[in-house]
Image: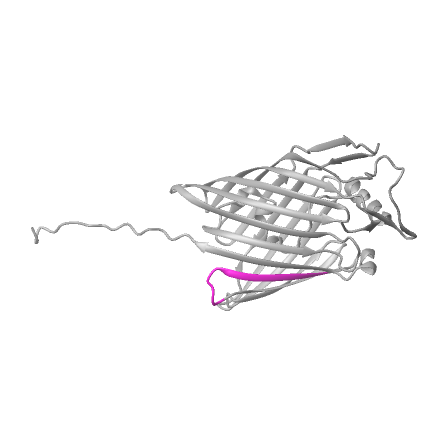
Amino acid sequence: MKKISLFLLGLVSILGVKAQQDPQFTQNMFNRLATNPGYAGSNGSICGTILTREQWMGFEGNPRTNVLSIDGGFKLKQKHQLGAGLTVIQDEIGPINSLNVKLALAYHYRIAQGVLGIGIEPGLFNQSISADWRTSEGNFDGTEDPFIPNSEAGATVFDLGLGLYYYTKELYVGISSTHLTQPTFSESLSDNSQYAFSQVRHYYITAGYEYDINSMFQLQPSLFIKTDAVNTQIDINANVLYNNLVWGGVTYRVEDAIAFLGGVNIPQVEGLRFGFAYDYNISDLGDYNDGSLEFMLNYCYKIQKKVKLERYKSVRFL
């Protein structure tokens, strides 16, 4: 197990009490299923996305997150469509490891010029903690604080999310919530220490638009807001897509970071794209890390509609 300092454990404890718990991402425009089950099946394709992020590089025990998401949809009638998706989020920060597995089920209904997706997301949330501490003076066997586990511990609880996702060809707007049940767990361990965690309910607002500047360039601004009703994170992004091939952009995370994004649609494989992002901290935390790095790989297989053959007989040929 990786050893960490008690200072970092204290930092993690503060984050758990006063800050948001869901992992942070920069390429949120390519990771919509992870926060909104209403998105499932909205793309008209079967899509798979892998996203990996290393936050605050150079900081021992820094957050490291991996995401796998798959979704697709099929039509029932002209105005009705169903979607389904699976999201697996693995997150590590210091001694704490989290695994969130979520199944998204969505119903899409055409209204006005767009489509409204309504999604529910039952799942399981597992959190575990190691107990291999290190101080600035050296290693030691344990602590006398009953709220710091001196042995490995963990638990799995039921989790639930809901989301609304409205989209047209150029526009999308979403509102959603994760950890609606605010799952909690508490257990007294054999060494008289205690392990407890409580997941806080999170709320998300997302929006994006595609604007054709000319035949070669497309502007893609987007907004991402995450809050736990105590702290709020706001990402304002603008990407520019060139010739439907490569893109680049900038994200401003209010009072925290500036991020630079880039990516390419792989021309040799239709539906395959690769993206990356680098975050530079503009807060005081920037003095203690080398920024954050994030990679994204996405593939979408377009669902082809079967052409219905129309046959008829001519009176000229009997």
Residue 269 among those drawn in magenta: yes
Residue sitting at x 77%, y 41%: 16
Position of residue 107 measured from the top left corner of the image (x, y, whole percent): 48, 39
Position of residue 183 measured from the top left corner of the image (x, y, whole percent): 68, 33
Residue sitting at x 57%, y 40%: 163
Position of residue 280 measured from the top left corner of the image (x, y, whole percent): 74, 61
Residue sitting at x 52%, y 67%: 245
Residue 225 among those drawn in magenta: no
Figure check: 134 above or below 286: above
Q: Give whichever of 113, 302 is nearer the camera.
A: 302
The stretch of residues the image draws in magenta is 267-279
Q: Magenta segment, principal secondary structure? A: strand
Position of residue 24 measured from the top left corner of the image (x, y, whole percent): 69, 50
Which image quarter: residue 291? Answer: bottom right
Left or right: where 83 falls relative to 180 = left
Left or right: where 262 falls relative to 43 = right
Q: Give whichever of 265, 154 is nearer the camera.
A: 154
Q: Residue furthest right?
A: 137
Q: Give whichever of 283, 114 is nearer the camera.
A: 283
Left or right: where 110 falls relative to 226 = left
